[in-house]
Image (tube, rainbow, N blue to C red):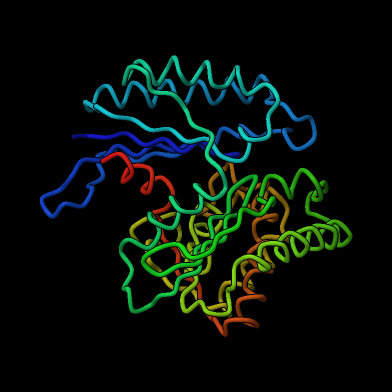
Amino acid sequence: MTVGAVDCGTNSIRLLIAEPGEDGRLRDVHREMRIVRLGQGVDATGEFAPEALARTESALSDYADLMREHGVRKVRMVATSAARDAGNRDEFFAMTARLLGSVSPGAVAEVITGTEEAELSFRGAVGELDAGAAPFIVVDLGGGSTELVLGDSEVTASYSADIGCVRIKERCLHTDPPTAAEIGAARAVVRERLAEALAVVPVEGAHTWVGVAGTFTTLAALAHRLPVYDPAAIHLSRTAFGDLLPVCAQLIAMSGEQRLALGPMHEGRADVIPGGAIIVEELARVLAERAGLSELVVSEHDILDGIALSIA
């Protein structure tokens, strides 16, 4: 049965249409991502902006068309950090129910908890990794939240931290490029939230750090000096901290225009990636100190794949 998975986060909305292969694993039929910035202003206002809802509706309408075209029989859509926070979320859910129902009657978007988000991300991220590299610390760095998940074949500990690339930008990084004071304020917020996460997730036992979502994939592409973004080259690539951290520092110091000129940079990510880079810097520092790790593995498979697997 062909299935459709939709992940609607704070910054992007993504679609995976997949079908079972001969080996029993899911095979991609279509995979797509659009930056819609659904979480625009939610941290400050507590509500979805009308223009953000309109962008999301336009993208989801196209996704529904694609799912019908490919004969999707079952669809699951999850909405994460922004939809948990917005006061006018009923408007969002009415729109998604109408569009998803045109694919599979009765389908509705779900707001999942941080724990559920962590488990889906972990399942999607580690499916192709050698079990001998466990325990894994999987980090899903989104627009509004960052999930830390520790496990081997199953999740043993997880925490959803209230930090993400969009949230850090809107809260702290107001200048282009950000000032030293803004960067310092952002770093303080990140360290505070990570301290809460690390009290729950014992990263000292981790053997492999796996990063998923757009901040990590973009950083890896830049560290590997790709002229344009290439998912096949990035999936399961390894990046030493010595190559990763200079890229983080450069992105934080650059202007938005300079970031946008970088070949692998998505135009919808150029203004928010400094916030993500600060989170990655702080994570690398902690994982080097506490777990002795020195490299990052980046997976193109993440919560979207976990969603598809959950209904296949």
Among all residues in the image, which is located at the extreme right?
Answer: 181
| Percent x, y of residue 286 | 66, 75
Q: Is residue 192 above or below residue 171?
A: below
Is residue 69 visible in the rendered structure shown here? yes
| Percent x, y of residue 115 | 54, 50
| Percent x, y of residue 250 | 68, 65
The residue lying toward the viewer, choosing from 60 and 84, is 84
Is residue 34 visible in the rendered structure shown here? no
The image quadrant of residue 30 is: top left
Name the residue: 25% across, 23% down. 69
Quadrant placement of the N terminus: top left
The residue lying toward the viewer, choosing from 161 and 72, is 161
The residue lying toward the viewer, choosing from 119 and 17, is 119
Residue 178 as seen in the image, left or right of residue 242: right
Among all residues in the image, which is located at the extreme left?
Answer: 22
The image quadrant of residue 289 is: bottom right
Q: How many marks?
A: 0
Name the residue: 48% across, 62% down. 221
Residue 296 as seen in the image, left or right of residue 52: left
The residue lying toward the viewer, choosing from 279 and 207, is 207
Residue 231 as seen in the image, left or right of residue 93: left
Q: Is residue 294 above or below residue 246?
A: below
| Percent x, y of residue 74 | 28, 29
Name the residue: 23% across, 28% down. 70
